Structure formats: C-alpha cells, structure tokens
Image: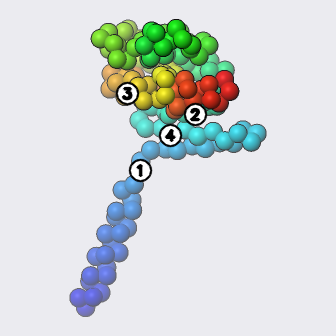
Amino acid sequence: MKKLLFLAVAIFSIVSLSSCGDTTAKNTTNTGGASQTSKTIGAVTHVDATTFKDLMSKNTGELIDVRTPRENQAGAIEGTTKNIDVTGPNFKSEIEKLDKDKTYLVYCRSGGRSGKAVKIMESMGFKHLYNLKGGYLGWKKAGN
C-alpha cells in the first residue's frame, strides 16, 4: 500500500513539474528553404535577420538603433529612423516620447543591448516590439 501511494505521488509530481516549462511561444517558418525562427516573450518578439528584413519590407514598424552614435556612424541598417543609445543618460526620456501603441524594430551591435532596450520599453508600456537576434553583426553576416 505504501509503495502504491509513493508511486502515485511520484507520478503526480512528474506530471505537475513537466507542465511548468517555458511559457514563451516559438515560431519557425520555412520560406523557400530559409528557415526563420522567432521567440515571443510578452510584448517582445526576438527574430533572426531574415524575419527582421521581412518585417522591414512590410513596413511593420519603426526601426530603432540603440547603439552609440559612433557605432551608428560606422554603419547602420538602411531605413533606421532613430538612434537612441540605450547606455546614454537620455534613453528613457527619448523613448518616452514615442507612441507606445506603434510597432518598433530594435537592434544593436550583437543583440544584447537591444534585448535590454526592449525589456525597458516593455516595462514602460510598449506593446509591439521586435528585437534583432545577433544585432547589426548578425544582419551583416546574413548578407544584408
């Protein structure tokens, strides 16, 4: 009887723990041989360079470079409308001026700072954010 009770508790525990996994949505699509992957967490979708380019071509949102002005001057993604340095003292005040209901495509050098920027933006109430995984370096590596 004790073994049966122990077995029932163990099975219940395993089933309960397995339902506590990752609650993010992962989407993979295939577009003529090129696989595109995105991961959505709250208001933020992290996308690869191919998906980012597709979003840009569909005029999905405003393009924001969150690198330093010096990095931006060395090269930027064509169509970038704003350069707001996420490490700068005015980042939040500049971001606060933007329409929170619009969609924004955000990138940095390699994806880390833009990841930080979209988290800040989400905490400020922005609802539609895309972060370029791999950043500008990934963009260039993908042949853009």
Q: Residue furthest right?
A: 32
Amino acid beneath label 3: Lys
Q: Which residue is mark 2?
A: 48
Distance from disc 1 to disc 2, alpha carbons, whole Å, reads: 20 Å
- Residue 33 at x, y = what percent? 74, 42
Q: Which residue is mark 4?
A: 39
Q: Which residue is mark 3?
A: 116
Please identify, in this view, whether the residue under mark 2 or under mark 4 is nearer the observer: 2
Look at the picture and state if 16 lies above or below 124.
Answer: below
| Nearest the eye: 104 or 109 | 109
Q: Earlier in the sequence, mark 3 or mark 2?
A: 2
Amino acid beneath label 1: Asp
Dot 3 falls on a residue whose secondary structure is helix
Distance from disc 3 to disc 2, alpha carbons, whole Å, reads: 17 Å
Q: Earlier in the sequence, mark 1 or mark 2?
A: 1
Distance from disc 4 to disc 3, alpha carbons, whole Å, reads: 15 Å
User: Mark 1 and 3 residues: CB-CB less than 8 Å, in contact?
Assistant: no
Q: Residue furthest bottom?
A: 1
| Nearest the eye: 123 or 78 | 78
Q: Earlier in the sequence, mark 1 or mark 4?
A: 1
Dot 1 falls on a residue whose secondary structure is loop
Dot 2 falls on a residue whose secondary structure is loop
Give the side of residue 142 with respect to residue 117, left or right.
Answer: right
Distance from disc 1 to disc 4, alpha carbons, whole Å, reads: 11 Å
User: Mark 2 and 4 residues: CB-CB less than 8 Å, in contact?
Assistant: no
Amino acid beneath label 4: Lys
Residue at left offset 33%, top offset 13%: 88
Please identify, in this view, whether the residue under mark 4 or under mark 3 is nearer the observer: 3
Residue at left offset 35%, top offset 75%: 11
For the residue carrying disc 3, how many other residues have a C-alpha within 10 Å: few (<14), some (14-19), or many (20+)?
Answer: some
Distance from disc 1 to disc 3, alpha carbons, whole Å, reads: 20 Å
Q: Which residue is mark 1?
A: 22
